[in-house]
Amino acid sequence: MFDSLLFDLMFVVLLGIISQWVAWRFSMPAIVVMSIAGLLVGPILGFINPQETMGDLFSPIISLAVAIILFEGSLNLDFKEIKGFSKPVGRIVTFGAFIAWIGGSLAAHYVAGLSWAVAWIIGGLFIVTGPTVILPLLRQARLKPRPAAILKWEGIVVDPFGALLAVFAYEFIKYINGEVNFNTLLMFFAASGFAIFIGCFAGWFIGRSLERGGIPEFLKAPVLFAVVIFTFVLSDEIMHETGLLAVTAMGMMMANMRISSLDDIKHFKENISVLLISGIFVMLTASLSPDVLLQIMNPNIIAFVVVMLIVVRPLSIWISTIGTELNYREKLLIGWIAPRGIVALTVSGYFATILLDNGYKDAEILTALTFALVFGTVVLHGFSISWVAKKLNLATTDDSGVLLVGGTKFAADFAEAIQKTGNDVMIVDRNYSNLVSARNKGIKSYTGNILLEQTELNVDLTPYQYMIAMTHSDRYNANVCADFGPDLGYDHLYQTETRRVNDEAERPLKAGQSLFIPALPISELERRIIRGDVMRRTLITKQYSYTNYLRDRDNQSVLLFIEREDGTLEFFSEDKEIQAFAGDTVVALASPQKTIERVKERLDEEGAAKEENVKEVVDYYVEPTSFEETKGYKDLPGEAPPTIK
């Protein structure tokens, strides 16, 4: 319908971003939504055909975009992440990939009906998964650390090797047919090794330049962007498809150099990658012809997809991980999840053209075969990964882990109180110095912006069911709660305020529930910690009810949360009412002196203000390190007072 290049570029980017938003809003796999959107506006309704409109620019644009996406993904491949389970990762990306190549080639020949030459080429290509498809699924499913890290590493590392394996198979077939000599094969391996060298050198050079201040701040991201493109094009010109290997090596080199300014650069790269992924999937699916969609219904193609899903993939994982520390549940999950993505689609189109030109007539179904596998795996794995992970107990549990956003002295003490309940807790802050108190207390912390995709990739968020934003910026707190609302549920999101106002029109931005009773500003909570207020734990019993506790507590104390008898947490909020029952523990922020005065008043009221008892209770409140004991209370007459830990 439209043949304007400018319109097509605008439309695919807009449609891609809208698809990303729809997927986020309704908790759906983004790749599925983007693929369906591309099919609707392309072969089904015929609104656009980017490949026809862009002509010779189509393939270079796709290739450059894939290179940038792959580099951005490889920036997350820090070897520290796989410390302790590097063996299964290494096995899967080497031996497992080889088994997948053999199995995929056999399936392509005997099930899809391809000739041996075409089958070996496409079998090598189909070992890929790729960051464009696996990373969105991992964020959606919230897997436990080990299976998530293995799937991420496999997706990024194997991606360039799949394309190279297809090239190697093609060159080897030409060698067998006498079209090239043995020196050509040697050149292939030499070019691959040189691509790795180029990538590592480029990563090392740009990393050192960033660290030594050789590049001004405003040029860091643009220079890195240009170097990535240069590295990709240089390697690809030496030998086709080695560019992906070069940018992957470059990203891995930089990821392990501990570059201090890398997080800011990742933010830029992340935004670019989101735009590219959004646009490319729409472009590729919109460029398919109706004939390709009809070919997908071929029974041989459908049977091939089924065999790849339930035979080849599980077999390659189970065999390659024999003797590793992976349990059978992890093997089942990893053996099921293997969505194919952009690299498979783009490289298969490249080989379809070359093979058809060289007389391999059966290569005409390669595009349909690849799209069937890509769409089938993306849909099936996208909608099943969360369910399968939960069934195998490899997803987020019902634990009441808490992620605090904003590092202060109060946050450190608050996190320590949560940690004593046995629940996971972590503090994230953009400023390293704000986390000093947390580190001194042994609280898990991370320096970074929680709103960045890179932080989500670097930090395992699966143990955390609650997120509390308590920075000194209302706007940032609101953005955090709004961003994580669809993932955690708004009933699990809280935020503090930076100030207290009476006029509703002046109230600060708010997307999460108010925190604590009363909902004091973070600055006031911080001031109270500095003056000496401490976290008090009070056990509610049948003898000492929650009503008694509310009557006795200091009016200036702040109700923080209730630790239920089963260990789960519920936070006090002015937006809802919660009750504590026998067996629950109430945690509040209170002044030690005020608490001592209240105890004295209570003892006076009951006529038991004996000097020795009062002294023992006073000592008990003043010495926080002795809170594990309950001495002194056994001698007090009357109704049992709260148990303080």
Image (spheres, helix red, strand yellow):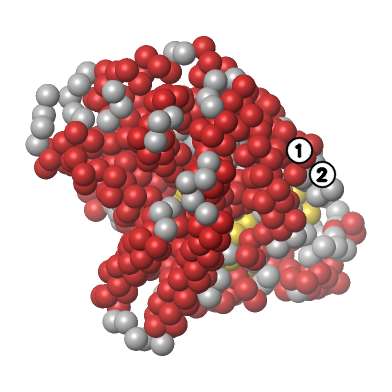
Secondary structure type for disc 2: loop
Q: Which amino acid does the dot numbered 1 rest on? A: Trp
Is the residue marked by circle 2 packed among few (<14), some (14-19), or many (20+) residues within 10 Å? few
Q: Which amino acid does the dot numbered 2 rest on? A: Ile
Which image quarter is the C terminus in?
bottom right
Q: Are marks 1 and 2 in contact (CB under 8 Å)?
A: yes
- Can residue 315 be seen? yes
* Relative to 286, residue 199 above or below: below
Name the quadrant containing residue 4.
top left
Secondary structure type for disc 1: helix
Position of residue 14 in the picture relative to residue 274 (left or right) = left
Which image quarter is the N terminus in?
top left
On the image, the x and y values in percent for residue 481 come to 42, 47
**Residue at 55% across / 20% down in the picture?**
113
- Residue 112 versus residue 544: which sits nearer the camera? 112
* Relative to 370, residue 254 above or below: below
Disc on res. 318? 1
On the image, the x and y values in percent for residue 241 come to 43, 53
Disc on res. 322? 2
Is the residue marked by circle 1 packed among few (<14), some (14-19), or many (20+) residues within 10 Å? some
- Can residue 586 be seen? no
- Residue 549 versus residue 486: which sits nearer the camera? 486
